[in-house]
Amino acid sequence: MEFRHLGRSGLKVSEISYGNWITHGSQVEEEAARQCVQAALDEGITTFDTADVYAGTKAEEVLGRALKGVRRESLEIFTKVYWPTGPGQNDRGLSRKHVTEAIHGSLRRLQTDYVDLYQAHRFDFETPLEETLKTFDDLVRQGKVLYVGVSEWSADQISQALKIADEMGFDRIVSNQPQYSMLWRVIESEIVPLSEREGVGQIVWSPIAQGVLTGKYLPGQPAPAGSRATDPTGGNFISRMLADDVLSRVQELKPIAADLGLSMAQLAVAWVLQNPNVSSAIVGASRPEQVRDNVKAAGVKLDDDVLKRIDDVLGPVVERDPGKTVSPPRRP
Ligand SMILES: NC(=O)c1ccc[n+]([C@@H]2O[C@H](COP(=O)([O-])OP(=O)(O)OC[C@H]3O[C@@H](n4cnc5c(N)ncnc54)[C@H](OP(=O)(O)O)[C@@H]3O)[C@@H](O)[C@H]2O)c1
């Protein structure tokens, strides 16, 4: 495993991290979840990402049990707050009340005294930014949270938060967690240049496009048994990536991966890691073999001619519109 700094902070993270969205507490049984976490640890992954909302809070519990007994100082545990975790008006969003209550729930479920990174899962238009940032700052001072970050915030929102933190002396955001893959490059035009200037690192999600970039989904054919596309929850999220023109072009990446002696998943993960503003690529897995496959992307260098071949193959199916980074206009 290779390690990178989380943005300009002193924290080091494994350049491949493990995330449990869709899988823990939902698509996969607890024993398979435990085996995936063990495979991640065996392969040198130290950074684990979850969120209170995953599987209706069950994912944090599964991860907490799977990591129990592992030396806490050798792990970086990340979680998030924003999406609803209960029926009430205040069981969601980034108000002082919800953020304070949410961190206590996450710490209890993860069985830890602190999280290394606490992330605002989306921007909350119904809470003054100062209120959220002050609350995050208080959690840092209380030692419940070591660093703060955001997820899927626009460049303008990140910029506003940094300005307020600087003016008020609050802890600064060190990371953003956006979707990023060969197919989804919406952060490149605005968020990455801002983040490079400001010392914010990207912890990128769905680097394999939820499995699509493995090439296992074939155009015009049913999804393979047991894959995310066949899962009732996962199927909704992956469907937007399953258009035939996308799947056909992904098949054409196979010779590029083969020429490099890489699996398709390794090529996809290595691709996001070529961006120096990426601190870590969060991979998901429904089976331990997938973790063992994906981690081999650590440290892989892709030459410019390989990057060009990939761009030529994917052509118009790559999404680059920075306007695709959006948070709900009202709390869900
Ligand atoms: N901040 C946010 O809003 C946000 C949103 C989404 C995700 N995330 C984070 O990012 C993490 C990763 O997201 P993701 O799970 O979508 O990432 P991903 O790595 O792009 O996709 C993971 C899925 O692809 C399939 N897969 C992975 N490796 C494979 C391999 N070697 N061969 C074949 N299939 C393989 C598996 O699904 P099947 O086996 O079921 O096909 C696996 O569960 C999440 O767990 C979460 O921590 C954050």
Image: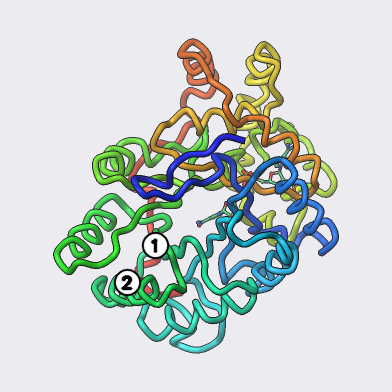
Colour convention: rainbow
Label 2 Cα crowd, 10 Å radius (few <14 / some 14-19 / many 20+): many
Q: How many labels does the image show?
A: 2
| Residue under the image location 66 percent in, 60 percent down | 71
Out of 291 and 254, give the one closest to the viewer: 291
Callout 2 secondary element: helix
Tag shown at residue 148: 1
Callout 1 secondary element: strand
Residue identifier under label 2: 137
| Residue under the image location 40 percent in, 66 percent down | 328
Mark 1 CB near ligand 1 (8 Å cut): no
| Marks 1/2: CA–CA distance | 8 Å
Label 1 Cα crowd, 10 Å radius (few <14 / some 14-19 / many 20+): many
The answer to whether residue 121 shows anywhere in this view is no
| Residue under the image location 43 percent in, 43 percent down | 5
Label 2 sits on what residue type?
Asp
Q: Position of residue 203 (x, y in %)?
A: 47, 47
The answer to whether residue 187 shows anywhere in this view is yes
Q: Is the residue under label 2 in contact with that under label 1 (CB below 8 Å)?
A: yes
Q: Which residue lies furthest to the bottom in this view?
A: 88
Q: Earlier in the sequence, mark 1 or mark 2?
A: 2
Label 1 sits on what residue type?
Val
Horizontally, is 194 left or right of 30 in the view?
Answer: left
